Image (cartoon, rainbow, N blue to C red):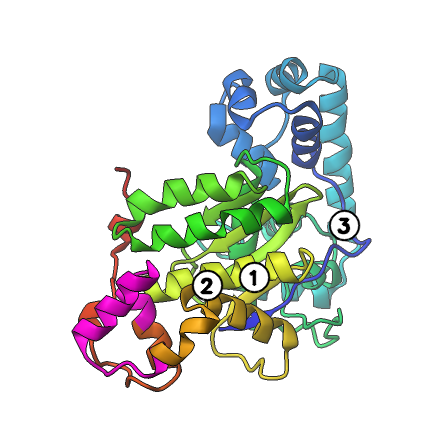
Amino acid sequence: MTKVEVQPFDKDWFSRPGDSVLSAMRRRRVSPSAVAERLPGGMPQLRELLSGFGEIDENTAFALSGAIGGSATFWISRQEKYLAALSQAVEQLSKEEADAWLAQIPTPGPKRRITANTRTFELERRLAYFGVSTLKSWDGRYGPNQRVARFRRSLTFTPHDGATSMWLREGELEANLHQTDAWSREVLESRLTAIRALSRIRKPSRFLKPLAALLASCGVALVIVKAPQGCRASGASRMIAPDKAMILMSFRHRADDHFWFTLFHEIGHLLLHEGAPFVDVEGMDVADDPYEREANVFAATMIVPKDREAELESLPARDEPIRRFAVSLGVSPGMILGQLQHRRIVPHGVLRRLRRHWTWEEIFAED
């Protein structure tokens, strides 16, 4: 489990009308469903507004006015000023930066062929979706930065960087639509035992809803977004508002040991690191990163408490002893197998029947 940390927005950003909609919803404590009921296009239209792609016409302006306040004139003016700012931001991009946006930073939907006629439109889509006006500000929030924010002057990003940024943005958008209580570290700590107990449930369709409810009671929106092609992220955690945190999970490998270790790892970041943003990605060296080591120790201890580690390390590489030990701890056998393999007590590929694997249909099933 490794990490790329992302930093808060640089000053080089501009506010979309959807940002104002979200701010008004939070300020007035109006639920997403209540706003969606007023909009002509319902929840899909609200998602479009928050993503930066949706526009506010006269009917939408009146609907927003009735749902979250502000006059219809205000919302129409807000849209017009935003479009002018977006157009200006595109005009101010250098050719080098514009080329980098188009070549390396994706947006949702099918990949489009970019021509001279569609170039401006595609640039506007990227700036609108990520809510920034330069690659420097994109890199500060979604790019592959380490703890000290920096901007790589080469303007070169890998396909993984672009795919991961889109995964993060999609997670943020979904988290904004989740209702939660106010963020509380103390409440989250008090819920850890109940969260851990859910790992015994086999089907994601049966543990994800109670898990999301437990986290929501702590001020954490749990979001599941399948990673797009090229994204190697397993999980991410960050504050998306002063009183709201997000844990984003990709279900990478679709196995119980990986899912629960990643979840506990992200909870560890929230509890130990004051809401700093983290993206945990496989295949990157973080041996010298104390934050990742701390989150890993937290996750491992959530599975096997310190006072049971000696017992874990003395387990034989056999099915029944591992199952009995898992039952005694109240966790799944696959999680114990994962810890044994991590410690190189059990070779990889052995006792695979202990690990639960899920299909995407099982993960997204509604029970």
CA gap, disc 3 and disc 1: 30 Å
Q: Secondary structure at mark 3?
A: loop
Q: Secondary structure at mark 1?
A: helix
User: Does 244 appear above or below 113?
Assistant: above
Q: Amino acid at mark 3?
A: Trp
Circle 3 sits on which residue?
Answer: 13
**How many badges with numbers are in the image?**
3
Q: Nearer the viewer, mark 3 or mark 1?
A: 1
Answer whether residue 318 is magenta in the image. Answer: yes
Circle 1 sits on which residue?
Answer: 268
Which of these two is toward me, 201 or 118? 201
Q: Check contact, mark 1 vs mark 2: CB within 8 A.
A: yes
- Which of the two discs, 2 and 3, labels the residue nearer the N terminus? 3
| 242 to the left or right of 110 | right
User: Mark 2, residues whose alpha carbon is within 10 Å: few (<14), some, or many (≥20)?
Assistant: many
Residue visible at 76% across and 45% down? Answer: 14
Q: Position of residue 238 (x, y in %)?
A: 62, 54
Q: Amino acid at mark 1?
A: Gly
Which of these two is toward me, 240 or 191? 191
User: Does 258 appear above or below 179?
Assistant: below
User: Mark 3, residues whose alpha carbon is within 10 Å: few (<14), some, or many (≥20)?
Assistant: some
Answer whether residue 239 is magenta in the image. Answer: no
Per the rendered image, the range of residues in magenta is 312-336
Q: Nearer the viewer, mark 1 or mark 2?
A: 2
CA gap, disc 2 and disc 3: 39 Å
Which of these two is toward me, 143 or 159? 143
Circle 2 sits on which residue?
Answer: 302
Q: Position of residue 223 (x, y in %)?
A: 47, 47
- Which of the two discs, 3 and 1, labels the residue nearer the N terminus? 3
Residue visible at 45% across and 43% down? Answer: 212
Q: Residue 206 occupies which quadrant of the picture? A: top left
